[in-house]
Image (spheres, rainbow, N blue to C red):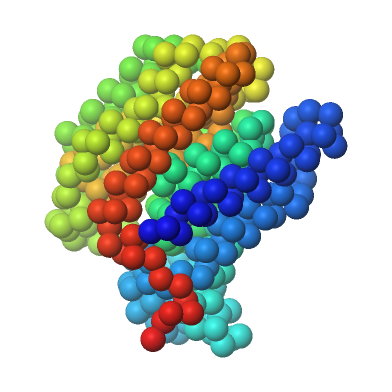
Amino acid sequence: MIVYPLVFLAATLFASWGDRRAQRRDGGVSLPRRLTLGAVLVIAVLAGVSALRWRVGTDYWTYEYAYDAYVEQLPDKLSLMGEPGLRLLAWLSNVVGTGSAGMFGLAAIITITLMVRTLWRWSPAFAFSVAILIVSGVWHGSFNGVRQYLACAILFAGHRYIIDRKPFRWFVVVLVAMLFHVSALVALLMYFVPTKRTSIPIQAAVFALGVVGMVSFTEILELIGAFVGDDGVADGIYANRSVSPLRIAFAFVPIALFWILRNNAAVTNANAWFYVNMLTIYAATYLASANSAYIARFAIYVAPFLALGLVSITAVPNQRERAFIRGALLCLYATFMYIQIVDTSNLSNFQWIFERE
């Protein structure tokens, strides 16, 4: 358990040092910016711990067991719907003789590098963004849904094509993400998320869609099952497992904070309305998933945007107020993260690859 606070401390310290160093060099925050030593050190910490874990994460055993099959199946799965991405990583790991550990290591390096690099390029408060990435559950969440988080990282890395209104390039990004998890197809809808300020009625309409999804979850699961060719999706135990009300409530914290602070000037100056609108999508997705943990997994694709959206809405002019708000928010998320990890033995009992039998 001690690994998690140590990682948080090391990553945020490196992020803060790298951010200050870059600002001294550039005479302030200049975005986008190229990868430098500070960001590389953050990647090394987060990706290194993730890559060197052993049987940490609920899905670890499933991927470990499937490793040999992944290697063998690669030639037959070289198609979009075949999801060859992780199979390719398994094949590469097999070629160099590192086994399933190499597959997990490659997945961790790609996932974390893409996410942290994106934050470094586009966050005006890099250390705070890295801290949110950790305490919001995105970092340790990647220990579980390895394939889906790889797809998520690819989408996050390419999201500026939405803001810059380049639909064809975003389409290509989605196709690449689908090589790891076919559910990434839903990210095509992200292109229609407004990049300008939205009103309360529009956000209320999005939440109303979330309510519709909540009461129609069976039909949604049947539609997903038909798309992936698995009629048993709607009948699965996981698909019919309710999501914790506390988790749903936490999903509304970012957008509620936006309306409390009403920091519109900072959001406008940072051209960050897309990120604020993604906070609405994040909350609505969890609302729709109240009756199905399976549907909640679609929130994975939106979760990294918390690390960018929360930067702008908490960027109040007064420095002390800003520090207090961000500190209180991190404490709130860290408490929730602690509860999650303690309640999950596959996460709390952290083991290193060097300890494997």
Could you tell me which residue is drawn at 61 percent across and 85 percent down?
96
147 vs 270, nearest the viewer: 270
Q: Tell me: 338 left or right of 262.
A: left
Q: Mark yes or no: residue 136 visible.
A: yes
Q: Is residue 95 above or below residue 314?
A: below
**As displayed, is residue 219 above or below residue 248?**
below
Residue shown at 57%/36% (left/top)?
128
Task: Please give the count of numbered marks on the rendered protein.
Answer: 0
Work out whether residue 126 or residue 201 is closer to the camera in this orientation and state it. 126
Question: Image quadrant for the C terminus?
Answer: bottom left
Residue 315 drawn at (x, y percent): 58, 21
Q: Is residue 29 above or below residue 300?
A: above
Position of 337 compared to 170: left or right? left
Lateral position of residue 215 relative to residue 132, left or right: left
Please report the residue visible at 21 percent of the width from the left and 52 percent of the height from the top. Answer: 239
Residue 69 image offset from top left, x and y in percent: 40, 82
Give how far across and how far down residue 318 sits, in percent.
60, 14
Q: Nearer the viewer, residue 147 or 243?
A: 243
The N terminus - image quarter: bottom left
* Residue found at x 62% / y 13%: 317
Q: Is residue 354 above or below residue 215?
A: below
Task: Tell me residue 266's x, y (percent).
Answer: 61, 17
The answer to whether residue 81 is visible is: no
